[in-house]
Image: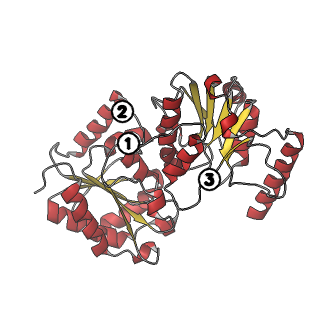
Amino acid sequence: MQSLEQFLKRSLFRLVNSFRPGIRYSPQQLPLESFNRILIIRQHDQLGDLMIATPAIRALRRKFPKAFIAVVVREYTAPVIEHNPYVDEVIVFYEKLGRWNIRKFVSFWKSVRNKFECVILLNTISRSLSSDLIALLSGAKYIVGPDHLKLDPSIPEKIYNVQVHRPQGQKHEIQRNLDIVRGLGADENDLEYDLVLTDAEVYEAERVYQILGIAPKAIVVGVHFGALNPSKCFPLDKLAAVIDWTIERYRAEAVLIVSPNEVDRKRIIESSLHHNVHSAPVMPLRIMAAFLRHLNLLMCNDTGTLHIAASQRVPTISFHSLSDPSIWKPPHPRHIAVRADDALITSITVEQVKEAVILAMNKYAGKSLV
């Protein structure tokens, strides 16, 4: 199936290139002073990838303070970019065909065709043909993308007519996104994420705490135990042992953060615990973000929830396997990554996690601890 998908992508890429003029521009040739409308495309990645891109979006706003900036995102990730102070319009791309109708298509068409001078594709790891087609659909004269992603190395690049060089060496993914916008003279030293909540969302999250009966001055440790990829899930029996130990050592209140597809796993972890814990209801993404912001600490797998918590400046302990945390975890010191030498999630020990909890509680918990 994957080889067929690659064949179709290359075939369509060749077809597009046959009609696309071969004019290329260096970043230095761009008339930056004339950029009044900029379109950013980041619609083919997951939740964490979009959060990681927010410093680059902020850098573009500071470089072009008066420009109209729109961002194309997938439906699932759109909530995290809502109310972003550096974005004028959020354009939703529906990945599932059944989610489209005539009204949505017309709205999408008009939004993307809205006289953008420049399109920026924040692609760092993989290249999306749908993102390329959206860029072409915009009609923008300049399409900016990195120079290391080629669907077909045998033919010249014609879609990205402004290619930004990708520097060699290992870098955090935040910096990789910033490398792309640096080609337009935009840069950013602050690597914090942007996810701005409304007063109503904050109030709703506080109401959930009241319903759960968690006292305002309690030490609250959140636990999110799910991940779409099982190889990224820290074993539940080990996690239960850490939760019990944390409750005993810090007299903490523990609360399980549950996603809709994790109800069965919740039952398993609850049956493994010796202490009572709270279980938060399934919440919309932005309400969950507001809920997380009141935690002293969040323990979680390497998922989007980690990055959502980071956006609210919540200290975290995250369990890593496939992805190198030096590249992917939030880079701030309050986020502590735990990873085994063999990069297997099952090889992480309870003692490793306990050491991380002690460090986090001593340095980053934010409240007086018992």
Q: Label 3 is placed on what type of residue?
A: Arg
Badge 1 crowding class, 10 Å Cα cut-off, few under 14, some 14 to 19, many 20 or more, is: many
- State whether residue 44 is above or below residue 91: below
Question: How many neighbours does mark 2 have within 10 angstroms: few (below 14), some (14-19), or many (20 or more)?
Answer: some
Label 1 close to label 2 by CB (< 8 Å): yes
Judging by the rendered image, the residue that carries numbered circle 3 is: 166
Asked if residue 142 is positioned above or below residue 285 in the image, the reply reads above
Q: Is residue 333 above or below residue 287?
A: below
Q: Residue 167 at x, y = what percent?
A: 59, 55
| Tag nearer the camera, 3 or 2 | 3
Which of these two is toward me, 356 or 303? 356
Q: Position of residue 61 (x, y in %)?
A: 51, 30
Q: Which mark is residue 289?
A: 1
Label 1, label 2: how many angstroms apart (C-alpha)?
9 Å
Q: Is residue 109 left or right of residue 217?
A: right
Residue at 13 percent of width and 55 percent of height: 369
How far apart, in angstroms, are the residues tagged by discs 3 and 1?
A: 33 Å
Residue with the mark numbered 2: 201
Label at residue 337: none
Residue 141 falls left or right of residue 39 = right
For numbered disc 3, what is the local secondary structure? loop
